[in-house]
Image (cartoon, rainbow, N blue to C red):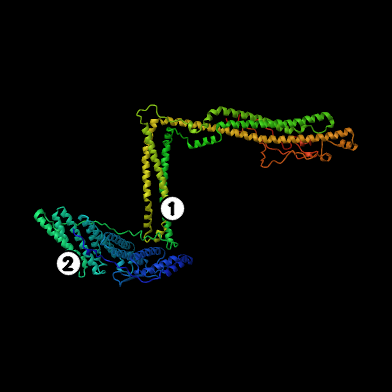
Amino acid sequence: MASPSSATNIMLSINEKKTVTIDLYRPLRNYIVANYSERQAQTLEDDLETLKQLRISIERSTTDSLTSRRDLYQTYFKALTAVESRFPISSDKDHVNSVTFTWYDSFKTRNKASQQNIHLEKAAVLFNLGAVYNQIGLGFDRSTVEGRRQAVQSFTAAAGAFAYLRDNEAAKASVGNSVTVDVSVECAGMLERLMLAQAQECVFENTIAKGSTPGVCAKISRQAGLYYEEALAALNFAPLSQHFDKTWTSHIQLKTALFNGEACYRSSLELHDKEEIGDEIARLKNGISVLSDAKKSAPRGAPQQILDAINKLEGNLNINLDRAMKENDRVYLMRVPPVSSLPPLPGFSLVKSMNMNDVLDASKDRMFAGLVPDSSAKALSRYTEMLDDVIRTQAERLQQGSELARVNLKEMNLPDSILALEGHSMLPMALREDVEAVQVCGGPAGLQGELQQLQDLRRVNHELLVQTEQLIQKEATEDAQFRSQFGARWTRNPSSTLTKNLQDRLNRFAANLKQAADSDGKIERSVKDNMALMSILDSRPIESALPTLARPILSLDANEDAVVGGLKQSLRQLETLGTQRAGLEDMLKDMKRKDDILPKLMTSTGSYEDLFRKEISKYDHISEEISQNLQAQEQLLLQIQAQNNQFASAFNIDDYNASCEKCYKQIEAAIAKYREIKENINEGLKFYVTLQEAITNIKQQSSDFAMTRSIQSREMIEDLQRQISGLSVQDGRNSSSHTYSQPGPANMHYRPGPQTPYYQPPPSGYVQPPSPLPPPSGGSPYPPQYGQQPGPTGSQYGQPGYPGWQYAQGQQPGSGPSYTPYPPNQNQSGYYKQ
């Protein structure tokens, strides 16, 4: 097997374009000041300076290393992309109209293009980037496997740069009268094919070095020839046919013939191994013909190294042809098909143009990020609306899926029936909360303690009434003794007249207390009568009171375990799908939060709609996952429905559900009765507390009255004793003129020390209860609540007034403020409502 000659290593080199010096700093700064502000220009000073230095480096880059120039072109292209989206450069008076880019043709160095068009600048930078990649590839030692591998990477990068030029900038840079051919669409396409051909050639050389089979080598060689053919075809048509030096055309033409001939040679070796001698002879003749025609058409000055490689390959073809023809004549005697009937040899490409989108992506650069044109802001708003619509639609689908699962499971009473079979029955949530509220308050068992509170309060009120009546009765007894002792000389009003108002109120309170005692009895009877009903509420946990779902006593096919196991497995799968939906929703929100396309909008040179479609497509895979999840759930719910029907039939679920409903109603009735009794007890407690305040108030009034009357008694006794003993004529005269039935301040000659007043200000924080009102129809079973009634403000013997003082002064009963008595309500039957 012959190896390629070192002469095949000769390849074409592309020179970089030249430019002239221009100033970008001052025109762009002036534009910022004119359209934004001086402050904004100062903020962007560093970016402007960076751009200026990059352009200067481009003008002087020929002295730098190849890798430095490569990095410089990439960085400057990204900067130009940022400039393009923010600074309109043209001859328009409102644009940056003082910048003209000038670049010379790489192949016809006298030709140049001058345009007020940033796309000419970008096209030239891309061309130079491809040229530098090409030169880097030529610099590797292609006599070694690693050198050829690195050369392949550089040539494919060069092909990517020229492809990017062709697809994005060439047409925009070839407008107007001042253009150059080297950055045209045709030239960029030809150079891409040429770079791929040189990359494939390096691959072929590595394939030969590795000792691959002749069939593989033939396909790789054929593909290299095809790439050279495509480049040659472009060179033979305008505008390239008259633009390139003939050495270029001759080089590519000979390389095309060389690799097509190489493909014929490698294919013939494979045919020889298969003993297909007739086809082998035809391929050898075809290869010799291709090489012979190439040499005949090659112009003077054709690369000698390639000619030497062709001559060597041609010699190998002739040697193998002679051998094959002799073997065929002597042994095989096969028919040799004509060359024209041979099918084209297949090619197999192991190279492709590098995708330069990531390399040249300027969206992550922050140059001039502070300048956001109105068009970009509007485009961002439009994209945000599109994205929100996508997120909202998918989120609604997820929520609908979860709701559908919830409703279906509820209709099938799942997983509650499975839990009930395992001894974990569950109450409906609302009913469970009601039970918990009852248990927190002590439950039915706690009602006995509250009934005891009622009894204690009733006893306290009764004792207060007895004590108050004793005070009044004691004062009346003392008054009667003095009246009997002194006869007509005891001239003050009798106690029964003055205490009538107090006595009436005490009688009324006593009647109310008796009525309340009757109501308490009814409550106690209600608690006793309904304790069996309410006792279910004391169950802890309440689920222990629910019926249990048991396995059937008799089983026909004993498949209950399989039915339950299958249903539980399906429920777990349904839960997994729900968890996946939650994760997909979180993923959507996270992607939206991180989705910032403003930098891409700012650097986009194409249609916004195209960019929008590309960016929105990022969410397609999540949308597809959501669809798959919902479809899987739909199928799973149908499966669960069938499994649940089997489960219900095997375990007689209908009877169990009926028992549960009956238990639920019992619990609801118990809660209602508990609340009714609890409400009546609370009314009773409130009544007794209020009544106790009212009785305590009357007791204080009665105490003040008794004290006042005691002081009066001592004064009158002292006056009477002086009259009887005749201690003083003047005192007797004054005494005979003193009238106790009409006492007044002028007649008082004895003033005791400070006395406890009949009415004192209420203590801090005390809220005076309201005056009694008639009970509304159908209201509380307790009598009305009582509040304090202001006492009289007059005084006698310099002492505080007392209840009934007005009556002693001749005021008619009922004419002043008093409590309206309420007889017991005979229509009330108890605290709770019947």
- Residue at the far left in the pictured view: 330
Instruction: Name which of mark 2 and mark 1 comes first in the sequence.
Output: 2
The residue positioned farthest toward the front in the image shown:
144
Quick check: 539 above or below 56? above
Q: Secondary structure at mark 1?
A: helix
Compared across the picture, whether 629 is left or right of 255 comes to right
Q: Secondary structure at mark 2?
A: helix
Measuring 17% from the left and 67% from the top, which residue is drawn there?
A: 296
Is 496 displayed left or right of 441 in the figure? Answer: right
Q: Does residue 740 appear anywhere in the picture?
A: no
Q: Identity of the amino acid at label 2?
A: Lys
Identify residue type, mark 1: Arg
Q: Between residues 560 and 237, which one lies in front from this camera angle?
A: 560
Question: In front of the other: label 2 or label 1?
Answer: 2
Mark 2 and mark 1: Cα distance apart in space = 67 Å
Q: Position of residue 73 (x, y in %)?
A: 36, 65
645 or 147: nearer the eye?
147
How far from the left and from the top, in percent, is residue 8? 22, 63
As drawn, the label of residue 821 is none
User: In the figure, is residue 730 to the left or right of 53?
Assistant: right
Q: Quadrant of residue 245?
A: bottom left
State whether residue 826 is above or below residue 308. above
Q: Which mark is residue 593?
A: 1
> Horizontal placement of 192 versus 447: left or right?
left
Question: Residue furthest toward the bottom?
Answer: 110
The percent coordinates of residue 451 (x first, y second) are 60, 31
Where is mark 2, residue-wise? 296
